[in-house]
Image (tube, rainbow, N blue to C red):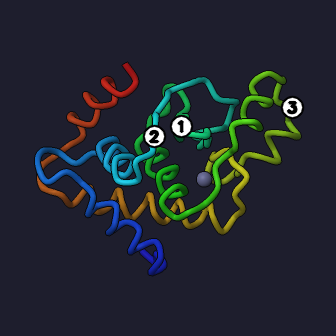
C-alpha cells in the first residue's frame, strides 16, 4: 500500500477520534468526525444516477454523504467520501446540488461531474479521487485489523443509520 504521508496521518487522526468503547464501524467514525468538527454529517441512501456510487454535498450548516441505494460496497464508498472531507477536498455546494436535482442529468453533466474510475460524483479532480481512494483503502485495512469480526454489526448499524 503506497498511501502518502498526508493520507496516512488523516487515517490515524480519524481512528484517533474513534469511540474508546464498543465496535468501530465506518458509520461510527463518520459520527466521531462530525462531533469533532461540531458540524453534522448526515448519511443518506438514495437513488443516484447510474454509475454513481457516492456524492458529498455541502450545505451551509451540515454535510451530507449520499450513497447509492443497494450498493454492495457502501462502507467503502462512505470511507471514500469521508476521505474527501477530512483531506480538505471540496464537496458539491448545495446550490449546485439543488439545480442538478431539478434538472434531468444529461450524460454530459454526469461525465463532467462523475469520476468514472471511482464512481464518485463531485468537482474534485483525479488527484483528489486518488487520495480519497487511498484513504478508504487504508481505513478499511486498519478497521479490518481491529479485533473481532464487525461485518454483522456494521450491517445492523447501516439499518439504523438509513432507517
Ligand atoms: Zn471521490
| Image location (x, y in percent) of residue 104 | 83, 23
Dot in front, 3 or 2: 2
| Relative height, residue 40 to residue 10 (above, below) | above
Q: Quadrant of the N terminus?
A: bottom left
Q: Which residue is most to the bottom?
A: 5
The secondary element bearing badge 2 is classed as strand
Q: Is mark 3 within 8 Å of ligand 1?
A: no
Mark 1 Cα shell of 10 Å, populated few (<14), some (14-19), many (≥20): some
Question: How far apart are labels 1 and 3 at the CA level?
Answer: 23 Å
| Front one among 20 and 110 | 20
Question: How far apart are labels 3 and 2 at the CA level?
Answer: 28 Å
Name the residue tied to disc 1: 64
The residue lying at 44 percent from left, 57 percent from top is 136
Name the residue tied to disc 2: 41
Instruction: Decide if residue 88 is on the left or right side of residue 50.
Output: left
Q: Earlier in the sequence, mark 1 or mark 3?
A: 1
Q: Are marks 1 and 3 in contact (CB under 8 Å)?
A: no
The secondary element bearing badge 1 is classed as strand
Amino acid at each position: 500500500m503506497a498511501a502518502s504521508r498526508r493520507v496516512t496521518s488523516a487515517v490515524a487522526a480519524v481512528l484517533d477520534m474513534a469511540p474508546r468503547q464498543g465496535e468501530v464501524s465506518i458509520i461510527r467514525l463518520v459520527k466521531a468526525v462530525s462531533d469533532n468538527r461540531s458540524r453534522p454529517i448526515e448519511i443518506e441512501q438514495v437513488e443516484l444516477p447510474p454509475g454513481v456510487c457516492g456524492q458529498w454535498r455541502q450545505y451551509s450548516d451540515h454535510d451530507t454523504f449520499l450513497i447509492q441505494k443497494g450498493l454492495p460496497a457502501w462502507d467503502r464508498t462512505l470511507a471514500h467520501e469521508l476521505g474527501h472531507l477530512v483531506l480538505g477536498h471540496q464537496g458539491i455546494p448545495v446550490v449546485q446540488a439543488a439545480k442538478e436535482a431539478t434538472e434531468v442529468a444529461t450524460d454530459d453533466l454526469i461525465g463532467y461531474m462523475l469520476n468514472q474510475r471511482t464512481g464518485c460524483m463531485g468537482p474534485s479532480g483525479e488527484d483528489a479521487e486518488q487520495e480519497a481512494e487511498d484513504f478508504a483503502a487504508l481505513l478499511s485495512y486498519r478497521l479490518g485489523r481491529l479485533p473481532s469480526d464487525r461485518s454483522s454489526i456494521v450491517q445492523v448499524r447501516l439499518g439504523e443509520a438509513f432507517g
